[in-house]
Image (tube, rainbow, N blue to C red):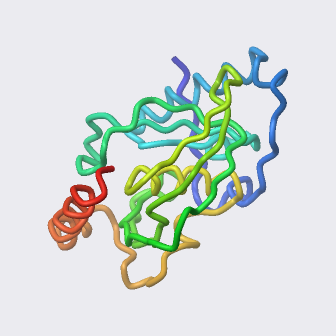
């Protein structure tokens, strides 16, 4: 198990565009180790996902998983997913206002508008192609992680800076209302 250091906002690598990798690169021991390290680092930090730039690697790889995550008990489950060279297509204009945090922006949260319905095409860790529709908070989780591959942090997408808060203040003043609203949304869209 290798847990890597997570880069924090202000580190210039988080603002760089990541490069695509080839299938040969993906099959290499170096890239397979990076994927294992991303999974270990995501689990150790209780993250819903992590992207390679967050550990200083500028390649288009991210891992996503939501199980019984204490940070996000309202999120629908997402099985462990390795996403390589993803391409996202927004299927319509429906948006949802989500309160997000990020492992690279410690102790901060803010409201971000995310597309509700997306199509994502990617390779898994073995180079197998996937073409999937993601909806609801699952779509939002994918968008958040894939933003990292383009040097975008959730802070860039906060539409009202008055929603920025620390975790402690979110828990104290905002969590109950957010969880009530987002639970109703999840029940409506199913994920």
x 24%, y 60%: residue: 188
How many marks can you see? Answer: 0
Q: Quadrant of residue 164?
A: bottom left
Q: Is residue 17 rendered to the left or right of residue 91?
A: right
x 76%, y 44%: residue: 58
x 81%, y 35%: residue: 21
Q: Is residue 169 rendered to the left or right of residue 112?
A: left
Q: Is residue 188 above or below residue 97?
A: above
x 49%, y 38%: residue: 64
Q: Is residue 84 rendered to the left or right of residue 40?
A: right
Q: Is residue 68 above or below residue 2?
A: below
Instruction: Give residue 176's position: percent from left, percent from top.
Output: 15, 66
Instruction: Give residue 144's position: percent from left, percent from top.
Output: 53, 56
Instruction: Give residue 137's position: percent from left, percent from top.
Output: 38, 55
| Residue sitting nearer the eye, 8 or 37 | 37
Instruction: Give residue 79's position: percent from left, percent from top.
Output: 41, 31
| Residue sitting nearer the eye, 163 or 113 | 113
Q: Is residue 117 rendered to the left or right of residue 57?
A: left
Q: Quadrant of residue 45?
A: top left
């Amino acid at each position: 198990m290798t847990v890597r250091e997570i880069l924090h906002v202000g580190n210039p690598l988080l603002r760089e565009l990541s490069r695509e990798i080839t299938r040969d690169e993906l099959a290499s021991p170096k890239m397979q180790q990076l994927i294992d390290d991303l999974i270990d680092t995501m689990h150790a930090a209780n993250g819903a996902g992590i992207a390679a730039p967050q550990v200083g690697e500028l390649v288009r790889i991210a891992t996503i998983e939501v199980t019984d995550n204490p940070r996000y008990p309202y999120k629908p489950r997402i099985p462990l997913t390795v996403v390589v060279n993803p391409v996202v297509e927004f299927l319509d204009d429906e948006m949802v206002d989500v309160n997000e945090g990020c492992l690279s922006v410690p102790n901060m949260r803010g409201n971000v508008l995310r597309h509700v319905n997306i199509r994502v095409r990617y390779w898994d860790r073995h180079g197998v192609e996937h073409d999937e529709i993601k909806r609801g908070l699952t779509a939002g989780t994918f968008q958040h992680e894939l933003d990292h591959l383009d040097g975008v942090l959730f802070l860039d997408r906060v539409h009202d800076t008055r929603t920025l808060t620390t975790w402690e203040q979110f828990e104290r003043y905002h969590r109950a209302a957010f969880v009530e609203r987002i639970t109703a949304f999840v029940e409506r869209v199913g994920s």
